[in-house]
Image (spheres, rainbow, N blue to C red):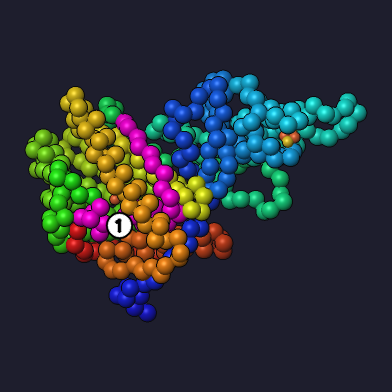
Amino acid sequence: MNAESTPQRQTPDSLMLYGFWYRALPSGQVTRNRLQKAMLLEMPLVIGRDRQGKAFALRDACPHRGMPLSCGRFDGQQLECSYHGWKFDAHTGQCRLIPSLTSDQELKVDRIYAGSYPCEESDDYVWVFIPEPSPPGAGFSKAVEPSFAAPRVPTFGAKYKIAYLTADLPCNVDHGIIGLMDPAHGPFVHQAWWWRSRHSIHEKQKNFEPIPMGFRMSAHTPSSNSAPYKLLRLYADADSITTTIDFVLPNLRLETIRAGKYWFSSLTTVTPITRTHCRIDVVACWNIFRWVPFGPALLKFVFAKFVEQDRQTMENQSEGLKHNPHLMLIDDADRPAKWYFQLKAAYLESRSNGAEMRHPMSGAVTLKWRS
Ligand code: FES
Ligand SMILES: [Fe+2]
């Protein structure tokens, strides 16, 4: 089969992947005295912070009759449902009290659970672990702790700045992700006098290699047609600037730029909110321009501009996607998008048959495109 050379018709399947950590909310939005609503993978959540400041995440529906727990009261330890006053432990979801029970009624309150999800904070975000959904009709029990920690932005020293950006995208998670790894839109979407012009388009060649659950654009010297990279080369006085970009399932894009003792590192996620909406969150850490007064503001400006250009593009694209047009992915520019779909399919297959995941790439590959 020669699927690599012919344009491939492919429609994103918008299947959401369970069994992973997802960014739910920026930490700063979760305060001690307020319950916050959040939506992840079409699941409504209520997120809060206990008296000690530790974050928790519960399903935003009471296991009794479905009232959103976010309508209830929180005393810093237990949530009380606003409908019949059942009380639940914020971290485990275990029921602590059913006020309507009389002393001779023997319902085992502590066997009842509200849905609760493992919760971690890293890089100024609250991350929530979303397990495989339980079969329809099954109630909740104690949440199982995941076997791995929430992802973090890689850092290369103790002193650095950190900043984040977030934007809602009116498209399913697959379009959000392949938009993120698509090299060919740059000259058309990301034009700015200080970045690059559309006429700077030229042939590029990049090496890719398989990594667990994903692929890596191997360390390379960034394209010379962008002003900030030229500036960085001057500033860092480094002979070599290298960039490495990783994509890892379900939704992680890690980019690391190193120039001598300076580095810039980011972790971007595209999180499924519903089948038709996703959210992009970029967290960046850097020690470049740390002492330049406007350095962080400048970097944030550049990043915000890019994210806004992508968001605007996807908003327009969603108009075109409304009526299910036929789509295609071409080589080589869309090969990363094909790998994404293949990785996703391989992951789902390994989940369903219990076998080890078969990586779609058998070794390193060089891709060429113009951008
Ligand atoms: S619906 Fe929550 S206590 Fe009844
Ligand atoms: Fe982009």
Up-down relation of residue 20 to residue 73 (above or below): below
What residue lies at 45% left-to-right and 54% top-to-bottom?
172
Residue 36: say if magenta.
no
Find out if the beta carbon at label 1 lies less than 8 Å from the nearest ligand 2 atom.
Answer: yes
What residue lies at 83% left-to-right and 29% top-to-bottom?
100
Does residue 202 appear in this view?
Answer: yes
Q: Position of residue 125 (x, y in %)?
A: 43, 34
95 left or right of 122 in image: right
Up-down relation of residue 268 to residue 13 (above or below): above
Q: Which residues are magenta?
A: 162-189
Q: Secondary structure at mark 1?
A: loop
Up-down relation of residue 289 to residue 203 (above or below): above
182 left or right of 212 in image: left
Mark 1, other Cα within 10 Å: few <14 / some 14–19 / many ≥20? some
What residue lies at 38% left-to-right and 39% top-to-bottom?
166
The one nearer the camera, 57 or 171, is 171
Residue 188: say if magenta.
yes
What residue lies at 26% left-to-right and 57% top-to-bottom?
185
Q: Which residue is mark 1?
A: 182
Amino acid of disc 1: Asp
Q: How many marks?
A: 1
Quarter of the image holding residue 123? top left
Quarter of the image holding residue 358? bottom left
Which image quarter holds the N terminus? bottom left
Does residue 213 appear in this view?
Answer: no
Q: Position of residue 103 (x, y in %)?
A: 88, 25
